[in-house]
Amino acid sequence: MAAAQVVVATGYEHSPHIPDWPGRDGYTGRLLHAADYRTAAPFRGQEVLVVGPGCSGIEIAYDLATGGARRVELAVRTPPNILLRAAAGLPGDLPALAMLRLPPAIADAQIRLIRRLALGDLAEHGLARPDEGVFARLRRDGKTPAIVDREMIDAIKHGRIEIAAAVEALDGTGADLADGTRVEPDAIIAATGYRRGLEPLVGHLGVLDERGLPRIHGGDAAAPGLRFLGYLPRPGQIRHMGREGKRAAKAIARETTTPARESATSPPRTPPQAEQPDGRRSPSGARPGGAADLRAPASPRPKSTTTAAPSPGRTRRGTQRRARRPRPAWQDMVRGVGPRPSPTSLGDSTPVRRRRARPGRIRLKCTHLW
């Protein structure tokens, strides 16, 4: 299929990614990605290790803890930035959109204050405060915070979700963690994120950076006729993608309709006239040396020397013109045109008193003029 314009909107998180842990192929338990998780019913009564403290990881761990799993552990390598989904009845996107316009250092200071007031100190439960703030990390590598509900934080504080160290290696029966401990879960759910997966599609065009992200996106053309939408993680993602789509649609319409408009507005081309031996061009377009036109030349129509007089009440364009009524004498007096009329000519015996008008202002004191 060939197309003049191509828009790629496969998503910022498209292809599930599982780290290549040493010994992963030899693990005999159940290993799956968070994208394949549906319900906690198959894991009832089992010990489950969830790897990754992002949005999906914390939500899956909470669903397992409340769905009948015997033990739920959450493996954490980098302490996450955790925000509540809603606070005081307002969604978290509203203050995040306002803070997005601030410098990252100022916005992160406000986020730390909100986190301390809303969540308290989670270090004693295994979740230390991250060294990098929400907006600083978002700008550096596009990592979004973990947006969760308060019930999930309560499950961590009450011990229903245990915090464990990061996974270093797997073997046939379990996993070795970064702190030297070992766990032997019945299943491992990898909530380890996604990749863009654009390399097989456009990797040969040179439009991707070292992380696999489009170098130019958001509605502007990365290459002639190629655009990428939805590859900027930020608060209010759906709304922002809608704006990108409108911008891309306008640019595509402008590029595709400009040649048609130029051809429509250009004057029609007249066929070239053949040049006669004497230098003149034949109006019929016949080539020199062709058959002569035996028809007698038409005599020119005599031009009329008389011009038709316009009909009364009509302009030259033929539109009806309203008859102009005579202007009252008092208007001439106000405008300073003509002699000053006498009081009797205004239709009233009351004398009219003229005052000197200020600049930009006309004052007239009269009675019974209408």
Image: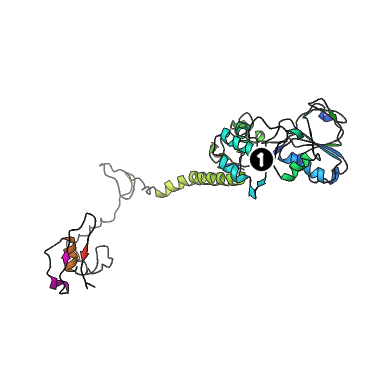
State the residue at coordinates (26%, 41%): 279
Q: Left or right: where does residue 57 sit relative to residue 369? A: right
Quadrant position of residue 43? top right
Residue 149 or 144: which is nearer the viewer? 149
In-front residue for pair 55/150 = 150
Residue 215 visible, this orientation = no
Q: Is residue 34 above or below residue 89?
A: above
Residue at (65% x, 48% y) in the render: 88
Q: For this rendering, which residue is in front, 294 or 83?
A: 83
Q: What kind of element bears circle 1?
A: helix
**Residue 320 x, y percent position in the rendering:** 27, 68
Q: Pinpoint residue 362: horizontal percent, then vertical percent.
A: 22, 60
Question: Residue 99's image quarter?
Answer: top right
Residue 39 in picture, x, y percent from top left: 80, 46
User: Can residue 352 be seen at all in this image of the molecule?
Assistant: yes
Residue kind at label 1, given as amino acid type:
Leu
Q: Quadrant of residue 28?
A: top right
Determine if the magenta segment contains residue 226. Answer: no
- Quarter that holds the N terminus: top right
Magenta highlight range: 336-361
Q: Position of residue 158 (x, y in %)?
A: 79, 40
Q: What residue is shown with label 1?
A: 117
Q: Relative to 275, is 102 on the left or the right?
A: right
Residue at 66%, 40% (x, y): give it.
117
Which of 14/105 is in front?
Answer: 105
Where is the C terminus found, in terms of image quarters?
bottom left
Magenta: predominant secondary structure element?
Answer: loop
